[in-house]
Amino acid sequence: MLQFSLPSESNREDVLAFYQEFEEDGGSCIGFAHRKNYDLWL
């Protein structure tokens, strides 16, 4: 079953990997402008 969770410090690597893969496939996400500074974004 699909389970959604909010980003947090404990899943930082998973969140960043998701967005990296998303961008590599040519996608873009609203609300992830500060992805270079995860702490600021979080």
Image (cartoon, rainbow, N blue to C red):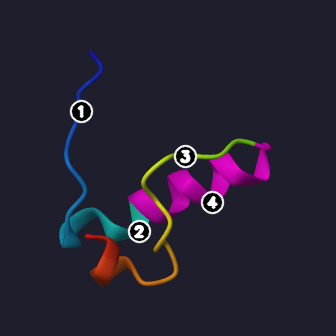
Task: Kindly identify which numbered label has been placed on residue 20.
Answer: 4
Identify which residue is drawn at 70% across, 52% down: 23
Q: Which one is closest to the eye, mark 3 or mark 4?
A: 3
Judging by the rendered image, the residue that carries numbered circle 2 is 13
Where residue 8 sits: x, y (%)? 20, 64
- Tell me which numbered mark, 4 or 2, is placed earlier along the sequence: 2
Given the image, on which type of amino acid does mark 1 rest?
Answer: Phe
- Left or right: 9 in relation to 30: left
- Tell me which numbered mark, 4 or 1, is placed earlier along the sequence: 1
Label 1 sits on a secondary structure element that is loop
Label 3 – label 4 distance at C-alpha: 11 Å
- Tell me which numbered mark, 3 or 4, is placed earlier along the sequence: 4
Label 4 sits on a secondary structure element that is helix
Q: Which one is closest to the eye, mark 2 or mark 3?
A: 3
Q: Are marks 2 and 3 in contact (CB under 8 Å)?
A: no
Above-or-below relation of 41 to 17 = below
Badge 4 local density, few (<14 within 10 Å), some, or many (20+)? Answer: some
Identify which residue is drawn at 21% across, 73% down: 9
Given the image, on which type of amino acid does mark 2 rest?
Answer: Glu
- Left or right: 8 in relation to 38: left
Label 4 – label 2 distance at C-alpha: 10 Å
Above-or-below relation of 39 to 20 = below
For the magenta stretch, what is the residue range?
A: 15-26
Q: Quadrant of residue 12?
A: bottom left
- Tell me which numbered mark, 1 or 3, is placed earlier along the sequence: 1
Where residue 1 sits: x, y (%)? 27, 15
Judging by the rendered image, the residue that carries numbered circle 1 is 4
Given the image, on which type of amino acid does mark 3 rest?
Answer: Cys
Label 2 sits on a secondary structure element that is helix
* 16 in magenta: yes
Q: Which one is closest to the eye, mark 4 or mark 2?
A: 4
Above-or-below relation of 8 to 29 = below
